[in-house]
């Protein structure tokens, strides 16, 4: 079991470009969560998805950010027209079900640097 | 509103001495409590979790934490620090109700001096 796989590990983008972050959940996990870690801050919830559905995107910025979890393939967090303030570590977690009793397994994160 | 406070942003200990990383939470409900560790440029690894069973929880790498409801605390301890323990530690609280109530502390960076 490979765990939660995120790629790329490091991503550098120029201002105005698009960033695509990928997350493959653990085998058997159908719930995916994205978090953002800004310097000197804790992790902040962004979005919660199940296969083909966005369940809660209350933590997502209203513009430029979107997420999907298609029937086949990894979950994608997409940031359009990146700005310096988007530089952060983005973590994905997965669980087999909703709720704290199932536990959350985190990936190693993608570190986005906007130059 | 739920919150979690890690009282020290940096802790420095000598190798072989005890480690204490402090965490307090606020809650009207019984939470589930976790400690995660993050080594430089690595992901988050679960150290231990409390889910209303025994109040003293043992985790990996010799760490343990004690849930004290009267003090709303869940401090992380280890009797003897090792160089490999140098990392950032996050106290995490999950309140009944699910995912978006996963609340992270801001983290404590542990430095271990040889």
Image: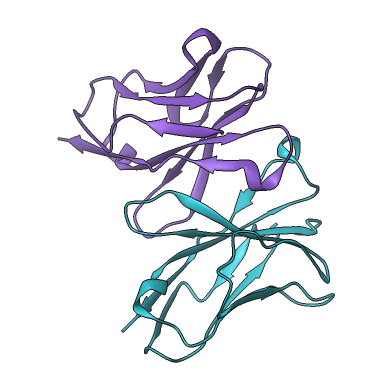
Q: Quadrant of the N terminus of chain A?
A: bottom right
Is residue B32 left or right of B48 when viewed as pictured? Answer: right
Q: Quadrant of residue B32?
A: top right
- Above/below status of B8 relative to B79: below
x, y (%) of residue B99? Answer: 69, 46
- Above/below status of B86 relative to B49: below
Residue at image position (56%, 33%) is B2
Name, please, the residue furthest toward the top: B70
- Above/below status of B2 relative to A12: above
Which chain is represented by purple in the image? B
x, y (%) of residue B41? Answer: 37, 60
| Front residue of this view, candidates A16 and B48 | A16
Which chain is represented by cyan in the image? A
x, y (%) of residue A111? Answer: 42, 69
| Front residue of this view, candidates A7 and A68 | A68
Residue at image position (65%, 48%) is B100
Report the coloring of the rendering.
by chain
- Above/below status of B112 relative to A29: above
């Amino acid at each position: 079991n490979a765990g939660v796989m995120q790629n790329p590990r490091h991503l550098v983008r120029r201002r105005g470009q698009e960033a695509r972050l990928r997350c493959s959940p653990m085998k058997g996990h159908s719930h995916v969560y994205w978090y953002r870690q800004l310097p000197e801050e804790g992790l902040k919830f962004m979005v919660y998805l199940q296969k083909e559905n966005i369940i809660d995107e209350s933590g997502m910025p209203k513009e430029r950010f979107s997420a999907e979890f298609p029937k086949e393939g990894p979950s994608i967090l997409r940031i359009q027209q990146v700005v310096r303030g988007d530089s952060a570590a983005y973590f994905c977690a997965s669980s087999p079900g909703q709720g704290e009793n199932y536990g959350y397994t985190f990936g190693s994160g993608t570190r986005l640097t906007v130059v | 509103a739920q919150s979690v406070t890690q009282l020290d942003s940096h802790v420095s200990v000598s190798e072989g001495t005890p480690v204490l990383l402090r965490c307090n939470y606020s809650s009207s409900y019984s939470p589930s409590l976790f400690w995660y560790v993050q080594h430089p440029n690595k992901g988050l690894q679960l150290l231990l979790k409390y889910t209303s069973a025994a109040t003293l929880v043992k985790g990996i790498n010799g760490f343990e934490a004690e849930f004290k409801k009267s003090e709303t605390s869940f401090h992380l301890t280890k009797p003897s620090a090792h160089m490999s323990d140098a990392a950032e530690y996050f106290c995490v609280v999950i309140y009944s109700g699910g995912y978006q109530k996963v609340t992270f502390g801001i983290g404590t960076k542990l430095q271990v001096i040889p």
